[in-house]
């Protein structure tokens, strides 16, 4: 097994975490004591948390498809959690998964 190519070590490294099933203020770093989220809290305090953002859809699949394509969910036909991105997004649209 060959080692990884390390020629791009100086490039920025981004990790985007998009969590599901909780409100924006139900995390410890936002001041909540209702639930315990130590790992999310640690990542948020060591990195960047977007506190002034919104989602294009209130459920995960359309929201994630919008994030991956830059298109509104109704434009790509993903309106609920029962459809697959790869079968509804036209081939000419850029997505992170296809790059």
Image: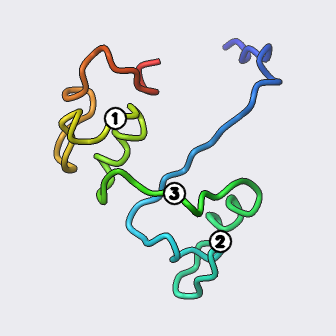
What is the x, y in percent for residue 15?
A: 62, 42
**Residue 62 in the image: x percent, y percent?**
29, 46
Q: Nearer the viewer, mark 1 or mark 2?
A: 1
Determine whether, in the image, residue 77 is placed left or right of residue 42.
left
* Residue at numbered disc 3: 53
Say which of 10 and 70 sits in front. Answer: 70
Q: Which residue is mark 2?
A: 38
Q: Nearer the viewer, residue 1 or 96?
A: 96
Label placed on residue 95? none
Q: Is residue 11 left or right of residue 71?
A: right
- Which one is in front in this view, the residue at disc 3 or the one at disc 2? 3
Between 51 and 41, the residue placed more toward the observer is: 51
Q: Label 3, label 2: how many angstroms apart (C-alpha)?
A: 22 Å
Residue 85: image x %, image y %? 27, 33
How far across and how far down the image is residue 73, in percent? 26, 42
Side of 18 relative to 80 (left or right): right
Say which residue appears at 58% left-offset and 79% top-offset. Answer: 36
Question: Quick one: label 1 or label 2, which is nearer the N terminus?
Answer: 2
The local crowd at label 3, few if under 14, some if 14 to 19, many if 20 or more residues have their Cα within 10 Å, is few
Picture layout, residue 91 above or below residue 63: above
Residue shown at the point (74%, 14%) measured from the top left: 5
As measured in the structure, the alpha-carbon distance from the residue carrying label 3 to the one carrying label 1 is 16 Å
**SS at mark 1?**
loop
Of helix, strand and loop, which one carries label 2? helix
Reading the image, the residue beneath label 1 is: 71
Which residue occupies 59% across, 63% down?
51
64 lies above or below 53: above
Q: Please tell me which residue is depicted at 40% across the width and 21% down the height of the picture.
A: 94
Sequence-wise, the earlier of marks 3 and 1 is: 3
């Amino acid at each position: 097994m060959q080692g990884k190519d390390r020629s791009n070590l100086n490039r920025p490294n981004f990790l985007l975490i998009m969590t599901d099933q909780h409100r924006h203020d139900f995390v410890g770093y936002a001041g909540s004591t209702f639930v315990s989220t130590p790992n999310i809290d640690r990542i948020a305090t060591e990195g960047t948390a977007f506190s002034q953002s919104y989602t294009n859809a209130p459920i995960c699949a359309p929201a994630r498809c919008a994030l991956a394509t830059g298109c509104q969910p109704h434009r790509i036909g993903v309106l609920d959690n029962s459809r697959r991105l790869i079968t509804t997004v036209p081939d000419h649209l850029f997505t992170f998964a296809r790059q």
